[in-house]
Amino acid sequence: MTKVGDSLDGIFVSDVEVDCYSVTLPGMVALPRNDLRALVVFAHGSGSSRLSPRNAYVARVLQEAGFGTLLFDLLTSTEEAVYHNRFNINLLAERLTAATDWLHGQGGLVDLNVGYFGASTGAAAALQASARRRDVKAVVSRGGRPDLAWDYLDRVDAATLLIVGGSDDRAVMGFNERALGRLNLGSRKKDNELVTIPGATHLFEEPGALEEMARIATKWFLKFL
């Protein structure tokens, strides 16, 4: 990792190239210097990237709570130009799995628990990837489409939190309600939960909505990681 800067509160930040099997993707790792608790890997939504300001905010909150974070692009620029790829959950889940292996391969990180934070289509990728690996202990979905990973939901062994906006987000709410039922067919029924943020819309742009969502997500990771 190449050091690109230290924040005043002791968080080491690096721009990295993430080896994802057949491709290399740009990313950013941030690691608290003291009391590193666990790792959270982010999966952004369709049309977004590692530079998502909402994900960056959540990552910052998690870092302040002692979590290391990885934000990375799920697709190359060429792949991103093909619209279908943005909804290719199999491909996105494969990239997330590869990035997790890469992160665990970095010095001193191999024994840390891992969680996934997914937004929109990235939530489906996070759930599908977590169903394939038992080292992922917790998943948080923000305004997600967990229904796109339907065939994998009953195999997810990670404690899963689905967060949706409570205002004018009825379609996504329906997707998440059905997904919670499917998740609860698995072994972690008591550890799966659906939470709404009152007054928030799909992107959590309302005053205080993003902050509340990040607080709830952090509490979940603290409990299960």
Image: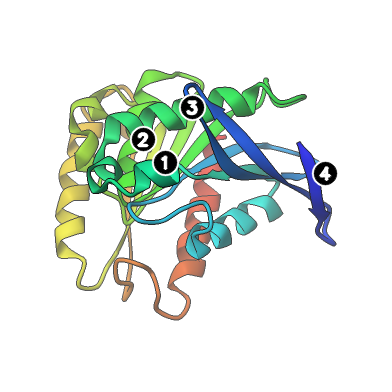
Q: CA distance from mark 4 to mark 1?
A: 30 Å
Q: CA distance from mark 1 to mark 3?
A: 22 Å
- Which tag, 3 or 2, sits closer to the chain's start? 2
Q: Are marks 4 and 1 in contact (CB under 8 Å)?
A: no
Q: Residues within 10 Å of mark 3 (few under 14, many from 20)?
A: many
Counting from the top left corner in percent of width and height, residue 225 is at: 57, 34
For marks 1 and 3, give the one nearer the viewer.
1
Q: Which quadrant of the figure has residue 9?
A: bottom right
Between 73 and 139, the one nearer to me in the picture: 73
Q: Secondary structure at mark 1?
A: loop
Instruction: Give the number of the disc on residue 75.
Output: 1
| Residue 152 seen | yes
Identify the residue under disc 3.
136
Identify the residue under disc 4.
33
- Which tag, 3 or 4, sits closer to the chain's start? 4
Instruction: Give the number of the disc on residue 92.
Output: 2
